[in-house]
Amino acid sequence: MSTSGFSLFLALLQLSGLLFPLRVSAIRKDIGFLEERSCRTTVQGRYLISDDEGNVCDSLSLDSRTRCCPWKGERFSCHGCNLLSQCCSSYEFCVSCCLSPTRTILEKVVKVKVAKPATAGTYKTVFDFCAGRCRHNSESVVHENAYHSKFHHCFSLTSNASGANLTQVETRLLGIDVIVGRQGDSCDAVCKSRGKLCVMNKLSLLNQCDVMQRYMSCNGSCLASAGADQPAEVVDDAPRDLYPGACLYTRTQSLLSCDGSHQYTRRLCPCA
């Protein structure tokens, strides 16, 4: 076969697609676009902002287009919060902590009324609940114009899981001054400094986590211990193996004592 004849043969094969199939291109129709991130945020704080994804940032870091905090740091942060009472010293971190799915469940909060009147509506989202609940808490106020603790931003569904028990305890403590002592002092010394005496048979009433967290910060933990200085709170500068900031109670009632003390704890004392 001549050279010109062979070239003609190859050309015919290419046209028929038998030797070198032509590349076929097409336009994909299944390409989608990422949904743009968009957030709701708190507006109460002067310096900090919490978004509805559980992030906290300063106002200068907020994305002006999406209104979201940067994806950095810890989501659902409980910085400065007492996890026993579910109360925080900062509004923004209260909202962030509250937004955690492990702490607040949508099915429960949508049944909670925004206000007490019967005509009041309910919260629509977890963010609505957290932003509203953390803003005000009547039980954290004393004399209607002052807070009894720096942990006054609270998000719990109820003021305390064992409210009925606390009411009974408070009734049995009528006439008793509950005093947080100084580091290293026994309850005998604490009460004596106030011109009173330690009431031994009332110590068992204070030897409960839900009671202690009413008077102490407890730093998010309440631990069983063994010692004559309980109920007590470990001071912040205690060695790490002593759990600084934690509240301690004893399961052995016979250990409760008015004269017990420890160099790294502050006792909770019943005085009269």
Image: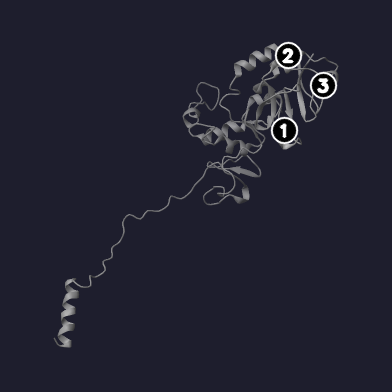
Identify the residue under disc 2.
202
**In-front residue for pair 150/258:** 258
Relative to 47, 266 lies left or right: right
Residue visible at 52% across and 49% down in the picture? 66
Residue 242, numbered label: 1
Q: Are marks 3 and 2 in contact (CB under 8 Å)?
A: no
Q: Residue 188 in the image: x percent, y percent?
A: 82, 18
Q: Are marks 1 and 2 in contact (CB under 8 Å)?
A: no
Relative to 89, 98 lies left or right: left
Task: Using the rendered view, name the quadrant where residue 139 is placed.
Answer: top right
**Label 2: element kind:** helix
Q: Is residue 54 above or below residue 263?
A: below
The quadrant the N terminus occupies is bottom left
The quadrant the C terminus occupies is top right
**Can residue 169 be seen?**
yes
Q: Residue 2 in the image: x percent, y percent?
A: 15, 88
Q: Residue 63 in the image: x percent, y percent?
A: 56, 51
**Label 1: element kind:** helix
- Mark 3 to mark 1 CA distance (whole Å): 22 Å
**Can residue 175 be seen?**
no
The amino acid marked with disc number 3 is Val
First in residue order: circle 3 vs circle 1? 3
- Mark 1 to mark 2 CA distance (whole Å): 26 Å
First in residue order: circle 1 vs circle 2? 2
Task: Using the rendered view, name the quadrant where residue 54 is placed.
Answer: top right
Task: Using the rendered view, name the quadrant where residue 181 is placed.
Answer: top right
Identify the residue under disc 3.
190
